[in-house]
Amino acid sequence: MDTYRLQKKIIEYLDNRAGKTVTRQEIKNKFIESVELRKPDPKIKKGKTPKRREKIPRREIEMIIDQLLHLLMQEGLVVQDKKLLLVASPFRLTGRISISRRGDGFVTLPTKSEIFIPGPLTNTAISGDKVQILPIAIGKRDRLEGEVTEILKRGRILYRMRVREKTNKFIFGSFLDMLGEEKEGVLHTKSLLKDTLDTIQVGDILVVKFKEGSPPQDNLYDVSSRLTKNPNEVQL
């Protein structure tokens, strides 16, 4: 088991213990395994005992656990009370996300530290959104990495969306103002007047707003403004 995977296992354990107490030693006792059996080699004759292979040394595992707990305590996810550690409930961080051109996310936390969100784990988050994050492990530069688990509030009201597909029930489109991986939005055709629906064609640019009452992660929108083929003509 490598260091990153070990950290993920520890965080999964703490997430399952949200709202409860645990001791540092309990965590260490659970995850410290200094040796493991190699998988049987089919070339080795039966009857021979497989050799033992040293995993991550015990002392190194203790240091990994201490470093991870230190970062989690800095962010208030774990609170120390003498020998007990109280795990926050929910075991989540909150902040506004910014998305890079590569599609990765960065969230500045209330402590002014920054957590990195790999592109595939940004969910449907858009720059400016207020998001909830589950830490995953310690990444590069000794900073936490995480995954967006919920979008609490969208960061803006209006968006430009190019119609990609039109069916009897839905209109699917791609947003033009978002960096990184292409983001998709959905319109329910039943929310549009028939005259408006008939004028919408694939390739049109719609100004849309988030559908009131719908969870942000559902990516449902309503048409807000006029249609055009030229995105530069649409002013938000």
Image (cartoon, rainbow, N blue to C red):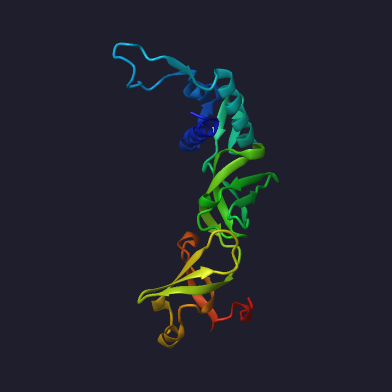
From the top left corner, tell me how far across and down residue 104 is, in percent: 59, 52
Q: Is residue 52 above or below residue 206?
A: above
Q: Nearer the viewer, residue 135 or 23?
A: 135
From the top left corner, tell me how far across and down residue 93 is, in percent: 58, 46
Residue extending furthest bottom? 195
Name the quadrant containing residue 209. bottom right
Q: Is residue 98 above or below residue 1?
A: below
* Residue positioned 62% across, 81% down in the render: 233
| Residue 186 as seen in the image, left or right of residue 72 | left
From the top left corner, tell me how far across and down residue 200 is, in percent: 46, 82
* Residue 211 seen in the figure: no
The C terminus: image quadrant: bottom right
Name the quadrant containing residue 92. top right
| Residue 8 as seen in the image, left or right of residue 116 | left
Residue extending furthest front? 43
Q: Nearer the viewer, residue 153 or 165?
A: 165
Name the quadrant containing residue 135. top right
Q: Is residue 220 above or below residue 103?
A: below
So how many labels did they put on this image? 0
From the top left corner, tell me how far across and down residue 70 is, in percent: 63, 32
* Residue 214 seen in the figure: yes
Residue extending furthest left? 46
* Residue positioned 39% across, 78% down in the render: 190
* Residue positioned 60% across, 63% down in the render: 155
